[in-house]
């Protein structure tokens, strides 16, 4: 064949070029490799798809079997009531229908039967309690709810609801004391928590039970958080209530006898706490110890010791260190404190011979001597001259020869009067003969006062006031 334009022969097979042939071969080889790789990938995808289909087929069998089991179980559940009786729900539904038809007693019977069949179904219990309450039977309404509060088969929430329902019933029926009883009789945590809300804590009474001399003062109190709680009490052993004595001030029991004091708190809801009680025995106590007016200590002037006892008691005392009793020296009047150191013990004894506690005192008496012996003699002579017993300071005596002289002898203590110098009177005649006159004088060592000195029937010193002759 030839070309129509140039007249040259057309060659269908090109001339051989090795380089071009090599490129063609390489290209064809790459295409073949790519085709082979795609075939391998397709085969791998095919295998995966087949494995997935096999797994899916197995799962389908499992699902079908599971569904069959569920269908069988549902059928059993549906068919069980036909063989074993009504369900809890059917009892509730049938009771509601009877109540709606005005047949409350029938509704109660249905729920009572349901309660017997399903004792742990709280819905039936609460519904039955409501129906009993609506029928006016609050006692049965409470008893039904106690199936929840008195067992451990229910949740705390359900038990709490049951307690709250019982408390509501007691409030409506004005049986407030029963609230305290039902909560106090239970030790579960739910009851304890509710009790803190409704029941006041017990009051506190002091002192504790015991025996007391003469009297006992009883106090009652309660927690500060219970400001609306009033305390009521009795002293004769009866249980207190809202008609008993209201506690306002401390209770003073001062009559001998035995007393059983009981007390309760009643809060703003009218709910009572538990009753507390103490027993007190008041006996006529021992005599009070005597009161000694002068305290122990040092004294420097004449002092009288005064002792006082309660009516009906006598005071006895000792100074030798022994304990006084009814055979000791009896206190009759104030005692002159003796010079020096003295240890006194006093006791009061009543008509029954019962003794008080012993009271002890230590006294140390040392008189302050402001007057010397010479001054004492001079005071005596001056006093006798002033009283016209002597004519002059030399001791001249009217109508007698010679003169009197006054000689210091010693110091003495005169009970109740203090310390004195004893001065002896002698008469000296003209011839120098000295004769005692038998008169003694006492001059106070503290103030220099002058008295005649004598003796009483018991031999004790006494002071005799000097008068004009």
Image (cartoon, rainbow, N blue to C red):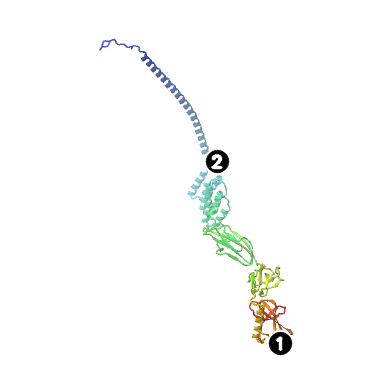
Residue 431 is situated, as x and y percent measured from the top left of the image, at 74, 86
User: How far is the residue under mark 1 from the one under mark 2?
Assistant: 152 Å
What residue is rendered at 67% in x and 81% in y? 377
- Between residues 229 and 389, which one lies in front from this camera angle? 389
Q: Is residue 389 left or right of residue 245?
A: right
Q: Return the residue at label 2.
A: 84
- Between residues 172 and 213, which one lies in front from this camera angle? 213
Residue 179 is situated, as x and y percent measured from the top left of the image, at 55, 55
The mark closer to the camera, 1 or 2, is 1
- Between residues 334 and 46, which one lies in front from this camera angle? 334
* Residue 239 appears in the picture as rendered: no
Residue lying at the far front of the rendered structure: 431
Residue 397 is situated, as x and y percent measured from the top left of the image, at 69, 87
Residue 246's place in the image compared with 160, above or below, is below
Report how many numbered discs are placed on residues in the image: 2
Mark linked to residue 402? 1
Residue 207 is situated, as x and y percent measured from the top left of the image, at 61, 61
Mark linked to residue 259? none
**Mark before the other along the chain sequence, 1 or 2:** 2
The quarter of the image holding the C terminus is bottom right
Residue 232's place in the image compared with 460, above or below, is above
- Between residues 412 and 459, which one lies in front from this camera angle? 412
């Amino acid at each position: 064949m030839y070309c129509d334009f140039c007249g040259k022969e057309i060659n269908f097979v090109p001339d051989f070029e090795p380089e071009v042939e090599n490129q063609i071969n390489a290209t064809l080889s790459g295409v073949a490799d790519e085709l082979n790789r795609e075939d391998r990938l397709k085969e791998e995808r095919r295998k995966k798809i087949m494995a997935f289909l096999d797994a899916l087929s197995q799962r389908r069998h499992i699902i079908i079997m599971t569904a069959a089991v569920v269908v069988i179980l549902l059928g059993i559940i549906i068919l069980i009531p036909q063989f074993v009786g009504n369900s809890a729900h059917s009892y509730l539904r049938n009771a509601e229908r009877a109540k709606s038809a005005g047949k409350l007693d029938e509704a109660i019977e249905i729920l009572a039967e349901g309660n017997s069949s399903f004792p742990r179904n709280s819905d039936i219990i609460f519904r039955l309690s409501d129906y009993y309450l609506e029928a006016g039977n609050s006692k049965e309404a409470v008893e039904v709810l106690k199936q929840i509060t008195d067992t451990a088969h229910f949740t705390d929430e359900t038990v709490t609801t049951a307690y709250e329902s019982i408390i509501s019933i007691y409030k409506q029926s004005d049986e407030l004391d029963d609230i305290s009883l039902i909560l106090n009789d239970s030790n579960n945590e739910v009851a304890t928590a509710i009790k803190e809300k409704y029941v006041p804590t017990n009051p506190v009474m002091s002192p504790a039970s015991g025996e007391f001399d003469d009297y006992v003062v009883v106090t009652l109190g309660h927690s500060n958080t219970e400001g609306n709680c009033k305390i009521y009490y009795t002293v004769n052993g009866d249980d207190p209530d809202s008609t008993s004595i209201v506690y306002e001030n401390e209770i003073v029991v001062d009559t001998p006898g035995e007393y059983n004091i009981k007390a309760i708190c009643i809060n703003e809801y009218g709910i009572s706490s538990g009753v507390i009680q103490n027993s007190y025995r008041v006996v006529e106590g021992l005599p009070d110890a005597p009161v000694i007016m002068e305290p122990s200590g040092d004294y420097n002037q004449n002092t009288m010791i005064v002792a006082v006892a309660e009516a009906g008691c006598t005071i006895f005392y000792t100074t030798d260190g022994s304990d006084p009793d009814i055979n000791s020296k009896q206190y009759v009047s104030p005692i002159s404190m003796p010079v020096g150191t003295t240890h006194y013990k006093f006791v009061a004894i009543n008509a029954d011979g019962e003794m008080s506690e012993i009271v002890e005192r230590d006294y140390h008496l040392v008189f302050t001597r402001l007057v010397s012996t010479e001054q004492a003699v001079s005071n005596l002579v001056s006093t006798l001259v002033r009283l016209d017993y002597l004519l002059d300071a030399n001791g001249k005596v009217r109508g007698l020869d010679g003169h009197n002289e006054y000689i210091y002898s010693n110091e003495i203590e005169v009970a109740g009067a203090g310390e004195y110098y004893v001065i002896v009177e002698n008469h000296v005649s003209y011839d120098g003969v000295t004769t005692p006159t038998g008169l003694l004088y006492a001059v106070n060592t503290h103030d220099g006062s002058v008295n005649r000195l004598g003796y009483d029937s018991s031999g004790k010193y006494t002071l005799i006031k000097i008068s004009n002759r």
